[in-house]
Amino acid sequence: MAVAVYADVVSSLSGALTKINKKSPHAVDQKMVLATHRTAPTTQVGKCNRMYLRGLNSVTRTTPVSAEETEKRTKFAAVSAAVNARMQDSSKQEADLAAFNAQKNTKGGKTTMRSYLWSLESATYDEAHNG
C-alpha cells in the first residue's frame, strides 16, 4: 500500500480531495481522491497518511443484509416517521415542549427536542414490538 507524505505546511489531510460529478456524462470515468489521516499511540511515523482512488461504482456491498440489520433499518424508519409526525402535530407541541424543558438540564437529559422525541418514540416502538 502506498504512503502519502505531505509537506510540512499541511500536516494532515482527511476527507475527499476531489469528488465525482454525478451529473456529468463522464461520471463513470472520473475518480474520487480520498485522503485519511490516523493518529494513535501505535502509529508509525510517516505511515499514518493514506490516499485512495475510488470510482463511481467501486464501493459495492459483498455481504447480504442480515436479519438484525433489517430489523434496525425497519425500527429507524418507523421511529423517524413517528418523530417527524409528532413534531408536526400541533396538539402535542406545547406538552412536548414543556416536558422537554423540564428534563433538559437534568443529568442524562436530552439536549435537543428531536433527540428527546426520538427517545420517546424509540421507547414506544420497543414496547410495542418487544413485549
Image (cartoon, rainbow, N blue to C red):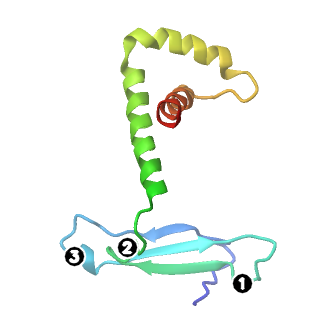
Q: In the image, residue 72 lies at what x, y percent? A: 47, 49
34 or 78, nearer to the observer = 78
Dot 1 lies on which element? loop
Mark 1 to mark 2: distance in Å?
Answer: 30 Å
The structure residue drawn at horizontal position 45% and vertical position 76%, both measured from the top left corner, is: 33
Residue tagged 1: 46
Report the residue marked by disc 2: 60
> Does residue 92 sit above or below 104 in this rendering?
above
Tag 1 near tag 3, CB within 8 Å: no
Where is residue 96? Give x, y as percent. 52, 15
Q: Callout 3: few (<14), some (14-19), or many (20+) C-alpha neighbours within 10 Å?
A: few
Q: Which amino acid does label 1 sit on?
A: Gly
N-term-proximal mark, 1 vs 3:
3
Relative depth, front residue between 38 and 19: 38
Gap between marks 3 and 2, in whole Å? 20 Å
Q: Residue at x 52, y 31 (%)?
A: 118
Residue 56 or residue 60, whichever sits in front: 60
Q: Say which residue label 3 marks.
A: 26
Front residue of this view, candidates 76 and 37:
76
Dot 2 alpha-carbon crowd within 10 angstroms: few under 14, some 14 to 19, many 20 or more = few
Of badges 3 and 2, nearer the viewer stands 2
Q: Residue 78 carries which label?
A: none
